[in-house]
């Protein structure tokens, strides 16, 4: 299975996607859309919209998706087996107030 995940380096939703990948031991390409303008442009072109995370699994783009939704897609399409192993981070949550404050302190330039 080929997985490309268009993620922010620090984001509750992005961390939820990463947690699902770790939970199921899935290899994936973690594509930084904040620090690389070309990656963000690629995500928008492929997904048809500007919101993240976006996860491409074997050519199928899942746009603006949570880790929980990624896991549900993988299970529904028999790409993974159910497991009782818990995720090591929330899989359906925005950034915490602490994470937002940390990001606000950094200067980020898209262009």
Image (spheres, rainbow, N blue to C red):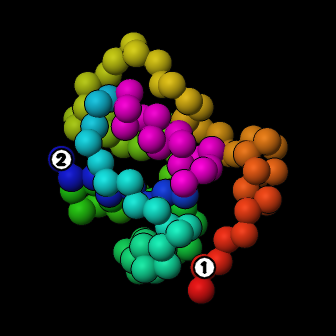
Of 106 and 68, nearer the camera is 106
Quadrant hosting residue 8 = bottom right
Of 50 and 77, nearer the camera is 50
Q: Is residue 16 left or right of residue 60?
A: right
Q: Any magenta on residue 18?
A: yes
At mark 1, the secondary structure is loop
Question: Which residue is outermost to the front?
Answer: 106
Question: Which residue is outermost to the left?
Answer: 1
Quadrant hosting residue 47 = bottom left
Magenta residues span 9-23
Of 67 and 31, nearer the camera is 31
What is the x, y in percent for residue 79?
A: 22, 38
Of 41 and 71, nearer the camera is 41
Question: Which residue is outermost to the top?
Answer: 84
Number of residues whose C-alpha sits closer than 10 Å to that of mark 2, classed few (under 14), some (14–19) or many (20 or more): few
When the figure is inspected, residue 40 is found, relative to residue 11, above or below; the finding is: below
| Residue under label 2 | 1
| Residue under label 1 | 110
What is the x, y in percent for residue 40?
A: 48, 74
At mark 2, the secondary structure is loop
Give the residue at x 26% y 25%. Answer: 81
């Amino acid at each position: 299975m080929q997985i490309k995940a268009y993620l922010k380096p620090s984001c509750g939703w992005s961390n939820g996607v990463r947690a699902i990948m770790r939970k199921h031991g899935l290899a994936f390409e973690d594509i930084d859309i904040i620090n690389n303008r070309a990656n963000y442009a690629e995500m928008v072109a492929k997904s048809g919209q500007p919101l993240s995370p976006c996860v491409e699994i074997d050519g199928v783009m899942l746009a603006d998706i949570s880790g929980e939704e990624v896991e549900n897609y993988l299970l529904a399409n028999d790409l993974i087996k159910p497991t009782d192993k818990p995720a090591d981070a929330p899989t359906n949550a925005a950034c915490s107030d602490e994470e937002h404050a940390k990001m606000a302190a950094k200067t980020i330039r898209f262009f």
